[in-house]
Amino acid sequence: MSDPTDHFGELTQSVSSRLATLRSSTPEVMKSFHDLGRAATVDGVLDRKTKELIALALSVAARCDPCIGFHMQTLVKLGVTRQEIDETLGVSTYMGGGPSLMYAASAISAFDEFSRAI
């Protein structure tokens, strides 16, 4: 039986499908956004995993479930540990208070869901 909180895989697929409309109607904007994301997360002084942890923290602070899903999916693929996630979510909660704590709980659900999938 699946966990009723498992929804991030479905959520990210659904959002990706809906974004296809924007890719068709505003290809320059969508390409530019994609290129920005790629440039921002490439290994540099900070490695890609660290940058994705920052993106996860901002996703929690912004209360964006799809963002949490996309960044957590990437982090799991990059081999993030539960402790790295927990510490990142601790900082998010420190900076964002109670509302961030609620989204941190969702982020844990996303980590568990995507970790089971690999």
Image: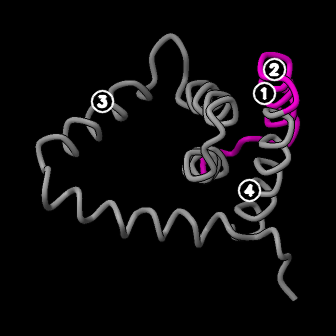
Q: Earlier in the sequence, mark 3 or mark 4?
A: 3
Of residue 76 and residue 62, the one placed in the foreground of this image is 62
Give the extent of the magenta segment.
Answer: 77-98
Q: Residue furthest top?
A: 45
Neighbor class of circle 1 (other Cα within 10 Å; few <14, some 14-19, many 20+) is some
Q: CA distance from mark 4 to mark 1?
A: 14 Å
Q: Amino acid at mark 4?
A: Ala
Bin the neighbour count of mark 2 within 10 Å (Cα to Cα): few under 14, some 14-19, many 20 and up: few
Secondary element at image label 3? helix
At numbered mark 1, what does the secondary structure look like: helix, strand or loop? helix
- Residue drawn at x 53%, y 62% is 12
The quadrant in which residue 22 appears is bottom left
Is 24 on the left-hand or right-hand side of 73? Answer: left
Q: Which image quadrant is residue 73 in?
A: bottom right
Residue occupied by mark 4: 110
Q: Quadrant of the N terminus?
A: bottom right
Q: Element type at marker 4? A: helix
Q: Which residue is mark 3?
A: 36
Q: Is residue 113 left or right of residue 38?
A: right
Give x and y (percent) for residue 27.
Answer: 13, 50
Badge 2 vs badge 3, beta-carbon distance below 8 Å: no
- Identify which residue, 116 or 70, lies in the foreground: 70
Residue receiving disc 1: 88
Residue 43 lies, in percent from the top left, at: 45, 24
Q: CA distance from mark 2 to mark 3?
A: 25 Å
